[in-house]
């Protein structure tokens, strides 16, 4: 095991990139004994992302028919499929590698994605990530939050809940929810159904590709009410920052 410190966080993973040896979904009983991800943020990986070709990524996007689910420019075609437009490129890259290695939950379409990307290379993943990251982020979703839901989500975004050891969502996803390099995803404008499902999967331990089990640990403390509020909150966030609540300025 080797540790690499990126932007203040220690990400522990197997040194180097994925060996791409896994074929088909793994035995569920063995999942918890394996690394949560085979991606390490080494100099080699960061260089691969920095030099990725979005034009080639667009070609791979077309060849793999990614638009059938994620749209021509990364806007999901239904609330079952995430919008990838403007997403943090490191997050997209890591997700594709994790799908390839069967480290993402089969309960969230991971089996389909695993087979879709099984013949792709790390360069393909980097180029796809560059293509999607270059697109404009999705517009804010037309959803309504009650005052109570906004207060719940806004509090978790800015403050978390120290009593339950929940750190502020903004610590990783940014003050405006746009994500932070290398692999903390943007949440703004994402479909409510998709965000809700991911938080539920993390909470239940079905999604297990988060290094150090960060999201699994935090989500395990969330109630259904809080998950719903957070899903709505980030869906309605646009390009402008969400105002902090009184007393948190």
Image (cartoon, rainbow, N blue to C red):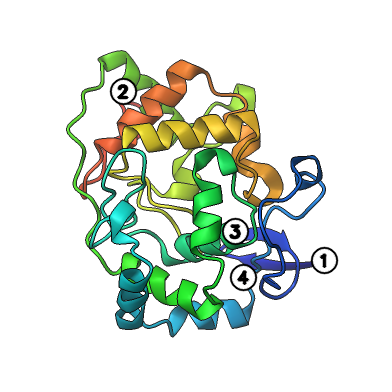
Instruction: Tell which of 99 and 178 is nearer to you.
Output: 99
Q: Residues within 10 Å of mark 2 (few under 14, many from 20)?
A: some
| Residue at 33% across, 65% down | 132
- On-image quarter of the N terminus: bottom right
Helix, strand or loop status at disc 1: loop
- On-image quarter of the C terminus: top left
Count the numbered circles shown.
4
Q: Which mark is residue 1?
A: 1
Q: State which tag comes first along the sequence, 3 or 4.
A: 4
Q: Which mark is residue 193?
A: none
Q: Which mark is residue 150?
A: 2
The answer to which quarter of the image holds residue 28 is top right
Helix, strand or loop status at disc 3: helix
Question: Which residue was labeled with disc 4?
Answer: 41
Above or below, 14 relative to 156: below
| Residue at 30% across, 75% down | 58
User: What is the distance, in whole Å, between disc 3 and disc 4 at their CAs?
Assistant: 14 Å
User: What is the distance, in whole Å, between disc 1 and disc 3 at their CAs?
Assistant: 18 Å
Instruction: Tell which of 168 and 203 is nearer to you.
Output: 203
Q: State which tag comes first along the sequence, 4 or 2.
A: 4
Q: x, y percentage for residue 59? A: 32, 78
Q: Closer to the camera: disc 1 or disc 2?
A: 1
Helix, strand or loop status at disc 2: helix
Q: State which tag comes first along the sequence, 1 or 3.
A: 1
């Amino acid at each position: 095991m080797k540790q690499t410190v990126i932007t203040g966080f220690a990400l522990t993973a197997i040194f180097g990139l994925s060996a791409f040896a896994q074929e088909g979904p793994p035995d569920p009983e063995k999942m918890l004994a394996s690394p949560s991800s085979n991606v390490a943020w080494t100099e080699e990986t960061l260089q691969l992302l920095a030099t990725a070709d979005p034009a080639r990524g667009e070609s791979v996007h077309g060849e793999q028919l990614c638009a059938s689910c994620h749209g021509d420019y990364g806007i999901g075609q239904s609330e079952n499929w995430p919008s990838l437009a403007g997403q943090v490129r490191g997050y997209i890259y890591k997700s594709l590698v994790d799908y390839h290695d069967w480290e993402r939950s089969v309960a969230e379409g991971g089996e389909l994605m695993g087979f879709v990307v099984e013949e792709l290379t790390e360069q393909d993943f980097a180029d796809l990530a560059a293509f999607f990251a270059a697109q404009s982020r999705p517009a804010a979703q037309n959803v309504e939050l009650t005052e109570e839901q906004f207060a719940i989500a806004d509090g978790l975004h800015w403050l978390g809940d120290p009593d339950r050891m929940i750190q502020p969502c903004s610590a990783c996803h940014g003050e405006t929810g746009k994500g932070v390099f290398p692999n903390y995803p943007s949440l703004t404008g994402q479909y409510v159904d998709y965000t809700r499902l991911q938080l539920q999967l993390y909470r239940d331990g079905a999604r297990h590709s988060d290094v150090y089990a960060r999201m699994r640990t935090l989500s395990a403390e969330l109630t259904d009410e809080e998950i719903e509020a957070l899903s709505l909150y980030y869906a309605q966030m646009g390009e402008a920052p969400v105002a902090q609540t009184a007393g948190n300025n």
